[in-house]
Image: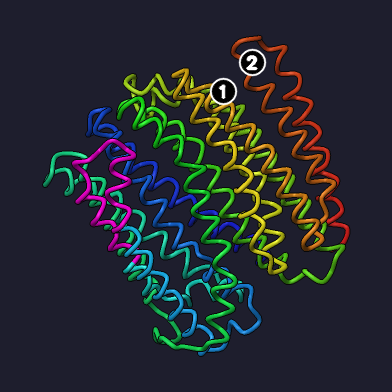
Amino acid sequence: MRVLRSGMLVLAANLTEVLSALVRNLILARLLTVEQFGIAATFAILMTLVETFQNAGLNRMIVQDPEAMQPHFMASLHGTQLVIGVAAGVLMAILAWPFAWAMDTPTLVVAYLTMAVIPLCTGFTHLETFRAQREGRFAPQALRSFISQPIGVLAVWPGFWWFGDYRAALVAIFAQQLSAIVLTHVAVRERFALAYDRDIWRRAFAFAWPLTLNGFLMFWVVNGDRMVVSNRFGAATLAWLSVALMLTMMPANLVARTVQTLALPALARNQHDGRQFAKLYNMTTTSLALVGVSMTLGLVLLGKYVLLILFGERYLPAQALLGLVACMNGVRLIRAAPVIAAMARGETRNPLYANIIRACAIPLAFAAAWQTGDLTLMLGVGIGGEVVAAIASGVLAWRHVRVPGRQYLICTALALCAMVGALAIPSLGWWAGMPTATGMAGLVIIGAVQWRGMKGRR
């Protein structure tokens, strides 16, 4: 019962984040022109680079490490976090002009420079909010989301009233980020402290560097296509692609973060119990595969109406991209399963290696878009890269930390069959939905067998 309550709380917090981000972007899309919304999307792209440093892994290390409850350990992680924050701020400042050049927005260099302040402030985040998850207390992190995310939404209106343009998005980003940092210091058991311990710092950097480098690769993988679109096709096309990505990445990230928050502690506790670990991992894989297929099918069938209701007729050109983008993010969502399982056994290089493989497809996607001017071809290449990366992630998890891989590969194949069938429905008719029905039925049967096995063990 406690697990169910924790799951509902985590889901509610993550849902608050996703819905707040969606509402914020909906408001901006209605207030701004399509071109101005495309410019505002460049801030969101740069914000994913900031999140690369925020997700350096220290918040997960304090959940996973056996010494997490010691005050000196947390203070040393705070010191590591501050060093990462300062380095990130300097790097963001250096990259402001090259980023503006890549996006073909040279007049926005100063705006991009101001975003370097965010990682500096993030260095003062109190990690006790995350350490509480080790004890099964998810309320502190949930409270942070429940308050900071609506603040970001409400900040849009004064920002637009003051500036009257895309800078309203920048105001909203700063309001949400700074309030989230402040809230980590509310109602904590220990004061924020900094310490230097060579052994802990070395362990922290060893834990964090693969995740940070992977974050850079993810930035390249997720946003590389948008950077090419902005430079090659202009702000309006970037706005349409950003809308398609928003409607697919937000639910995918919601599910991935919720599953990671719940599954990582459970897998870590059972990392030496091979049988129970395998059951938890297989259940995680099947659940993620079903969500990925459902998201793709839903947006293929209902994407037009979702766009009309949420964004209006100005954004209907995004419909042509929705199914492909949903499929790409659905495959990426499945890939989260071996990443979480490997992390539970202290292996953080899995997503790095998989994303290196995924990144190899990006030059091909760029060439396709640049030479043909066809965004659908570019996205098709991206889907192929995600499939190869997903297979590699499962194989690497097996080779490095003996995460069982057979059922993961079966679920990935069934999900891919279902998603390809869903993409074919608009052009080939309903008979093309047979692979979708077959794939989903297979996943449901596997999930039912797993659930029965878990209940039997209890």
Residue beneath the point at 56% across and 54% down: 257
Seen at 35% across and 70% down, the residue is: 86
Q: Secondary structure at mark 1?
A: helix
Q: Is residue 126 above or below residue 235?
A: below
Q: Is residue 46 visible?
A: yes
**Magenta stretch, main secondary structure class:** helix
Residue segment shown in magenta:
93-119
Q: Amino acid at mark 1?
A: Val
**At 32% from the left edge and 64% from the top edge, which residue is drawn?**
90
> Residue at point 53% right, 47% down?
253
Q: Which residue is mark 2?
A: 425
Considering every residue shown, the one lying at the far top of the view is 428
| Figure quadrant of the C terminus | bottom right
Q: Are marks 2 and 1 in contact (CB under 8 Å)?
A: yes
Q: On the image, which quarter does residue 236 sit in?
A: top left
- The type of residue carrying mark 2 is Ile
Q: Is residue 448 magenta?
A: no
Q: Up-down: is 85 above or below 43?
A: below
Numbered marks: total? 2
**Label drawn at residue 300:** 1
In which quadrant will I find the N terminus?
A: bottom right
Q: Is residue 303 visible from the viewing direction of this image?
A: no
In this rendering, the answer to whether 278 lies above or below 157 is below
Q: Is residue 128 left or right of residue 184?
A: right
In the figure, is residue 59 to the left or right of 277? left
Q: Position of residue 348 (x, y in %)?
A: 64, 63
Indicate how the structure is coloured in the image: rainbow
User: Which is nearer the N-term, disc 2 or disc 1?
Assistant: 1
Whole-percent x, y for residue 289 in the image: 70, 40
